[in-house]
Image: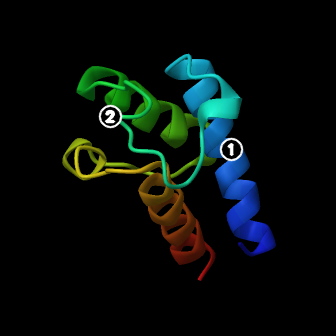
Amino acid sequence: MHTEQVNVYDKIVEILRDVAKVPADQIAPEKRIEEDLSIDSLAMVEVAVAAEMRLGVSVPDERAAEFFTVGDIVDFVGAALAATRG
């Protein structure tokens, strides 16, 4: 991972820990959101809202519903941040 991706990953881990109450040591890019981390759709909306508030990235509900792994979240947020920076 590049430095910027690591920073985004760390922020996502923080959000998943704080909002979805998932221990940080259980979070990894390949972990499946529902199956491995037991994050349901309602909690995923809360994660998306937290990402918007903390990182300034808009995560539409329909897009958040498509996230399958932690890596999917990191990739989306990283791409959205890169797009805002031009």
How crowded is the residue under tag 1: few (<14 C-alpha within 10 Å), some, or many (20+)? some
The chosen color scheme is rainbow
Which residue is denoted by mark 2 in the rendering?
35
Q: Residue at x 40, y 25 (%)?
A: 46
Q: Position of residue 48 (x, y in %)?
A: 41, 37
Is mark 2 in CB contact (under 8 Å) with mark 1?
A: no
In the image, residue 45 sits, relative to residue 21, either above or below, namely below
Q: Position of residue 10 (x, y in %)?
A: 72, 47
Q: Residue 21 falls in which quadrant of the image?
A: top right
Instruction: Check the picture and name the quadrant holding the C terminus.
Output: bottom right
In the image, residue 34 sits, relative to residue 63, either above or below, namely above
| The residue positioned farthest toward the left in the image shown | 62
| The residue positioned farthest toward the right in the image shown | 3
Ranked by sequence position, the earlier of labels 2 and 1 is 1
Q: Position of residue 51 (x, y in %)?
A: 52, 40
Q: Identify the secondary structure beneath mark 1.
A: helix
Q: Residue at x 37, y 49 (%)?
A: 59
The amino acid marked with disc number 2 is Glu
Q: Residue 1 falls in which quadrant of the image?
A: bottom right
The amino acid marked with disc number 1 is Lys
Q: Which mark is residue 11?
A: 1
Q: Which mark is residue 43?
A: none
Q: Residue at x 49, y 54 (%)?
A: 30
Give the distance between the C-alpha atoms of the residues marked 2 and 1, in whole angstroms: 21 Å
